[in-house]
Amino acid sequence: MSSNNQNIQDIPQKGFFGHPKGLSTLFFTEFWERFSYYGMRAILLFYMYYELSKGGLGIDQGTAASIMAVYGSLVYMSGIIGGWIADRLLGSARTTFYGGVLIMFGHIVLSFPGSLTGLFVSMGLIVIGTGLLKPNVSNIVGDLYSKEDYRRDSGFSIFYMGINLGGLLAPLIVGTVGQEYNFHLGFSLAAIGMFIGLVVFIFTKGKYLGPAGSNVPNPLTAAERKKVFGRFGIGAIIVIILGAITIPTGILTINGFTMIVSILGIIIPAVYFIVMYRSPRTTEVERSRLLAYIPMFVAAMMFWAIQEQGSIILARYADQRTLLHFAGIEIQSSWFQSLNPLFIVLLAPVFAWLWVKLGNKQPSTPKKFSVGLFFAGLSFIVMIIPAIVNGTDTLVNPLWLVLSFFLVVLGELCLSPVGLSATTKLAPAAFSAQTMGLWFLSNASAQAINAQVVKLYSFDTEILYFGVIGGISILLGLLLFLSSKKIHQFMRGID
C-alpha cells in the first residue's frame, strides 16, 4: 500500500454509519448535485415538447425524446474529460468543485425565460460540469478504502443512497413547481440545490476528506502542458468555426447531431479500452482485469439503455398514457421520476447489509451484473401487459409504472453500486479516475444508442418496442451468467 493510501486509511474509520467520515461529505455533496440534476430532468422533456402557450418550447415529441437521450449521453461522455483532468492536472477534489460551479451556472441559464439557444447553452454547461464532478466524487469514495476493505461495496451502496435521496425529493419539489407554476421557477430551484452542494463540499472536505482526492496520479510535465493546451485551443477554435458555418446554413441539424453522438457513443469506449490496454503504464495483471471489464461494460450499456428510458419513454408514458387522477389524488406526471430513487433509498440499505452479511460467500461481480440485466428486461416486459389487455388507446393504471420502476431498481442495485466498486478495483493505477469516467461512459454509450431507439416508440409500436428491448436484456443476462466463471478468472484475485 502506498504512503498516500496509508494516510487516507488514518482518517477516522467509523464516523458515518461505520464508515470513514469523509463519506458524509461526499454523500451530501452528491445528494445536492443529484437534486439539481434530477429536478431539472424531471421537467425538461415536458418543457421541450409542451406548446408555447403552456410555457414550453413546442418541439416535436420524437425530437425532444432524442435530445433528452443525447443530453444524457453527453453528460456521461464528458466524464472522460473530467477523469483526464483529475488524473493529469487537478486531482479529483478540485475537479469536483469546478464541475459543481459549472452545473450551477447551467441551471441558472435555464431559470430565465429563453429560446432553443438558451436551452443548448444550459445543456453545454451542465454537460461539462457533470463530467468534471460525477466520476471524480465517486473516485474519492474509492480513495477512502483500501482495495482489501470488505466494507467497500457497502460504502458505495450508502453513497448511492445519497445520490438517490436527492433524486427522490427533486421531482416532487422541482417537478411540482415546474408543472403547477412555471418551468423556469422549477429550474431555479435546481440551481439553488447545486449551490448548497458546493457549500457542503467546501466547508467539510478539509476536515473529513484529508488527502483523499488531492493526489494527481499522472501529472503533465511542463512540455506536455504546453502541447496539450495548444491542441485544446486549436480544437476549440475549429469547433466554433464549424458550428458558426454549419448551424445557420442548416448543414448540421438536430437529427444530424444526434446521429454523430450515437456513433461516438460506440467509438469512444472502444478507443479508450485499446489505449489503456496498450499503455506501457498498464501491467500484465491490469490488462487481464481490463479484459474482464469489457463484458461487464457491455452488460452495463444494456442495463442503462433500459433504465435511462425511465426519464424519456416512461416519462412520456406517464404524461400521455397514464391515469393521473388516482385514488382521489391528482398526480403530476413528473412525480413518477421519484419512483426509481424512492425504491433505491428503501432497498439500498438492505443490499448494503446483504453484501456485508454474505462476505466472501456473495455472488461474483459478473453474476450480480447478470441478475441486474434480468430485472431490467423484466421491467420492460411487464409494460406489454396493459397494452395487450386494454389496447394502447386507453389510459393505464399508474401501478403498472410503479411495478416497472420497482423491477428496474432491483436490477440497478445488483449492478450500479457494484459496478462503481468494481471499477475502482479493476482500474489500472495510472488511469484510476479515467477508468471511473469509462464506467460512466457505459451510460453515455447506452443513451447515445437510445437517441436513435427512442424515435421508434409510439402507441402503435408499444408492444413490440417493450418486448424486443426487454427480451434482449434477459438474453444477455443469461449469457453473462453462463460465462461469469471465466470472467472472474480474468479479474485476477478481485472479487
Image: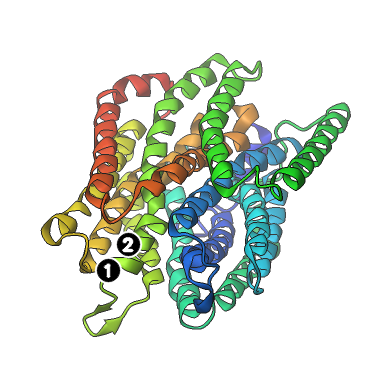
Q: Which residue is mark 1?
A: 322
Task: Give the distance between the C-alpha atoms of the residues marked 1 and 2, in whole angstroms.
Answer: 6 Å
Image quadrant in which the C terminus is located = top left
Looking at the rendering, which quadrant does residue 386 occupy? bottom left
Looking at the rendering, which quadrant does residue 293 occupy? top left
**Residue 147: horizontal and vertical position, in percent?**
50, 35
Q: Residue at x 67, y 63 (%)?
A: 118
Q: Amino acid at mark 1?
A: Thr
Lower position in the chain sequence, tag 1 or tag 2:
2
* Left or right of residue 202: residue 233: right
In this view of the protein, which residue sits in the foreground, 191 or 123? 123
Mark 1 and 2 residues: CB-CB less than 8 Å, in contact? yes
In this view of the protein, which residue sits in the foreground, 159 or 234? 234
How many badges with numbers are in the image? 2
**Residue 326: horizontal and vertical position, in percent?**
23, 78
In this view of the protein, which residue sits in the foreground, 10 or 210? 210
Residue 213 shows up from this direction: yes
Q: Amino acid at mark 2?
A: Tyr
- Element at label 1: loop
Q: Residue at x 63, y 62 (%)?
A: 116
Image quadrant in which the N terminus is located = top right
Dot 2, how many residues are within 10 Å of its Cα: few (below 14), some (14-19), or many (20+)? some
Q: Which residue is mark 2?
A: 317
**Residue 414: horizontal and vertical position, in percent?**
33, 44
Residue 141 shows up from this direction: no
Dot 1, how many residues are within 10 Å of its Cα: few (below 14), some (14-19), or many (20+)? many
- Element at label 2: helix
